[in-house]
Amino acid sequence: MPVPATLEFFIDPARCIGCQACVQACAECDTHRGQSMIQLDYVDRAHSTQTVPVVCMHCDSPTCAEVCPADAIKRTEDGVVHSARKPRCIACNNCVLACPFGVPKMNTEMQLMMKCNMCYDRTSVGLKPMCASVCPSQALAFGTREEMARLRPSARPVNTFQFGAQTITTKVNMMVPADDGPDWVDVTAAMHEPTIGHQMLDDIFDDDVFGGDGFIDLLNDDPADA
Amino acid sequence: MSPEPPLISRGASAPQDADRSTVPPDGRPLAEQPKWRRDFPIDWPQDEYVSRRDLVKFICLTSVAFVVGQFWIVGKSLFGRREAALPALAIADVDELPIGGAKTFRYPEGSTPRLLVRTGAATFVAYDQQCTHLLCPIVPAHREGMGVAASERGLELHCPCHNGWFDLETGRPLAGPPRRPLPRVSVEVRGSIVYATGVEEPAA
Ligand code: SF4
Ligand code: SF4
Ligand code: FES
């Protein structure tokens, strides 16, 4: 049974609070019981508590499968890219190194590449993947596009990524700011930049934003007119 | 440096039909792709697909392989029973054994036990002592049953484990579970000494 076409995966890293619930829940998934396939990345640990959950983006042209010399990585008709087929995988690690998002994991004990398969046992029958079902801030969300538009009026899904010269379109969506967000996400753009940029610090003390005196009066701020 | 705008934009809105096939990174149609891309599709349905030609090829090749295998088995049972060339080894004195008497020996040194049986005044036979069923040691004995008394039947080789019987002259299985003949050890009487001169390799 394929994953229903109307249901999609949405990731909003800005909502991630680093609670690790998804990491724990992932290990409960029946398709890879006991092994968590999700990765919680610290973006810039020295300066920020921001974390980003990394799940497979299920690329339209999966780089992992493109580089697999053993023809082991297959995608089902609904666009879900699956773990390597055990009889074929030669544990060469090519996919692990090639994935633009750093998703596949090598299980050296089993000599098998394993990766997030969107909890295929659940999503193929219309249930949410484990991670999305537990994420308290819904940084990982699974549902229809309409639902998402209603719940997140200020964000918009993007599924195009730039990785060096490679353009990647994916089944999984990344949420970006609705009005001035980018049309595609440059995966490596922020590689050498501090995560909390000057932009944000500037904003806080910006006269134009906060009415003149460069002072934010948190106590007297009326949330109603914010 | 700002990246080029995306080349392909299929994404989640792409049609989800079962015939959708791998779109390579360069985005060109499948017909313009190298052959290996068609041979190794990324999509599951195409990967599972077996064409009629492939099926026919598979059936023909496997049946040819079966036929060849049958001939090989026949050929091996016809010509395959070769003797290993070994130096002769004195294994017994002629007078040491009574007619019908038996003795174990090892030939070549360190082999599994072999059984030497005196069948007549100057005739001896020898076989590997391991039963060809489950390797129990065989002994010479008279078979009883089927209306024939033990004393009326000639000497045969008996495996007591599962009541297997072998012909003394040829080593062929006569009764019980064994299906293959005992590997023969050729013996030669020179003067008063019995020599082992060769061992038949067991049928594989
Ligand atoms: S995100 Fe990585 S693992 Fe997932 S399909 Fe794309 S290349 Fe493969
Ligand atoms: S590790 Fe396995 S799945 Fe990954 S590229 Fe090598 S053979 Fe293919
Ligand atoms: S071992 Fe000889 S008959 Fe079974």
Image (cartoon, coloured by chain):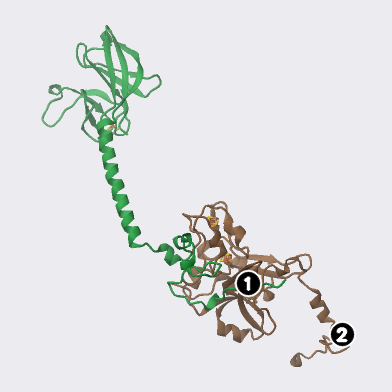
Chain colours: A brown, B green
Q: Residue at x 36, y 19 (%)?
A: B86
Mark found first going from the N terminus, 1 or 2: 1
The quadrant of the rendering that contains the N terminus of chain A is bottom left
A134 or B183, nearer to the observer: B183
In the visual, does A225 lie left or right of A98?
A: right
Q: Residue at x 78, y 72 (%)?
A: A196
Answer above or below: position of A165 versus B162. Answer: below
Question: To which residue does mark 2 refer?
Answer: A215
- How far from the left and from the top, in percent, is residue A119? 52, 68
SS at badge 2 = loop
Q: Disc 1 marks which amino acid?
A: Phe
Q: Chain of mark 2?
A: A
- How far from the left and from the top, in percent, is residue A61? 54, 68
Point out which mark residue A161 bears.
1
Rate crowding at label 2 as few (under 14), some (14 to 19) or many (20 or more) other CA atoms within 10 Å: few
- Can residue B134 be seen by looking at this rendering? yes
- In space, the residues marked 1 and 2 are separated at their CA atoms by 38 Å
A35 or A165, nearer to the observer: A165
Q: Nearer the viewer, mark 1 or mark 2?
A: 1
- How far from the left and from the top, in percent, is residue B193? 29, 9
- Whether the residue carrying mark 1 lies under 8 Å from ligand 1 is answered with no
Instruction: Give the residue furthest to the right.
Output: A213
